[in-house]
Image: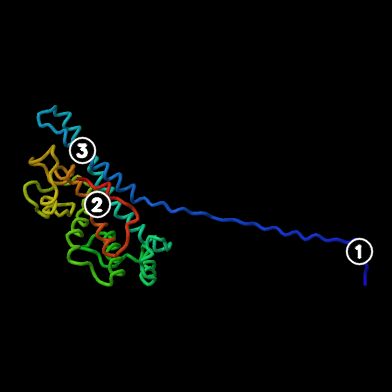
């Protein structure tokens, strides 16, 4: 045997470790907070309305009022979108908020989360897929279609979505003033619904201006947008027996 005395060997092993951290940030509460702040500001401005004040001042106040009211409408829609997206993502990440859901329901909801899979699924009154996301989740969890007492809330949100779309994709087109002729309603809004459910802007109330956007975009419309959104999500999460991930009742407009 060879003499190995005095011979040493060193084994050097290097380990390289790396990790990627990701953080989920919920934003639905910011959307509804901002929508509520806009609605409150719109309400505050309309309280200042004085038909005998300087016309230039009234015009400036009216435009500011409409700007805040439009913000409330758009951001209420953003809140609705964020709320349902966060729900689906909670299923993806198996968050504690959805611990009451069955594994079968979670898997079914996860299979739908790929947005392409929402295309072609049943929609409510031909609306965008926003309401479909809520209705499909309701159907999966409860194994049936939405109840009759949900219809009025769906109508509210359907009209809110249409109003948001009309604002975001606004085009200055001729439209009916004295009657609701479908041919002169380029935004496909349910003008009868708006007339019955939303009070007119105080600055142009009872004028001959078109209902949209002149008379209906104001403090009462902003209040309706915020409150209808909160009431709808309250109802939805109550029906599927899930707790809301945020407490948004402080943003309700009285």
Mark 1 crowd level (few <14, some 14–19, many ≥20, 10 Å Cα): few
Residue 153: give its label.
Answer: none
Q: Which residue is at a point 56% across and 56% down the rendered structure image? A: 19
Q: Farthest residue in the left direction?
A: 178
Q: Which mark is residue 65?
A: 3
Is 19 above or below relative to 68?
A: below
Earlier-in-chain disc, 2 versus 3: 3
Q: Earlier in the sequence, mark 2 or mark 1?
A: 1
- Front in this rendered view, residue 33 or 20: 33
* Residue of label 1: 5
Q: What is the secondary structure assignment of the residue under circle 2? A: helix
Residue at point 35%, 70% (across, down): 105
For the C terminus, give its image quadrant.
Answer: top left
Q: CA distance from mark 2 to mark 1?
A: 86 Å
Q: What residue is pinned by disc 2? A: 165
Instruction: Point out residue 106 in the picture as x, y percentages from the top left corner.
Output: 38, 68
Q: Label 3 neighbourhood size at 10 Å, few (<14), some (14-19), many (20+)? A: many
């Amino acid at each position: 045997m060879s003499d190995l005395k005095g011979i040493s060997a060193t084994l050097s092993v290097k380990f390289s470790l790396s990790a990627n951290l990701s953080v989920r940030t919920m934003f639905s509460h910011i959307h509804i907070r901002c929508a509520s702040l806009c609605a409150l500001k719109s309400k505050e401005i309309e309280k200042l309305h004085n038909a005998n004040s300087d016309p230039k001042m009234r015009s400036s106040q009216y435009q500011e009022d409409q700007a805040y009211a439009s913000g409330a409408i758009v951001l209420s829609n953003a809140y609705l979108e964020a709320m349902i997206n966060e729900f689906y993502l909670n299923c993806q990440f198996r968050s504690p908020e959805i611990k009451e859901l069955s594994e079968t329901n979670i898997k079914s909801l996860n299979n739908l989360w790929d947005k392409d899979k929402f295309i072609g699924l049943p929609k409510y009154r031909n609306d965008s897929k926003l309401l479909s996301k809520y209705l499909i989740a309701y159907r999966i969890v409860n194994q049936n279609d939405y109840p009759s007492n949900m219809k009025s809330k769906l109508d509210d949100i359907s009209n809110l979505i249409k109003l948001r779309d009309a604002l975001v994709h606004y085009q200055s087109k001729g439209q009916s003033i004295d009657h609701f002729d479908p041919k002169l309603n380029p935004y496909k809004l349910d003008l009868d619904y708006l007339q019955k459910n939303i009070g007119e802007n105080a600055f142009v109330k009872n004028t001959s201006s078109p209902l949209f956007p002149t008379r209906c975009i104001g403090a009462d419309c902003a209040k309706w947008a915020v409150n209808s959104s909160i009431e709808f999500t309250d109802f939805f999460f109550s029906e599927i027996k899930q707790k809301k991930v945020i407490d948004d009742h402080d943003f309700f407009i009285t």
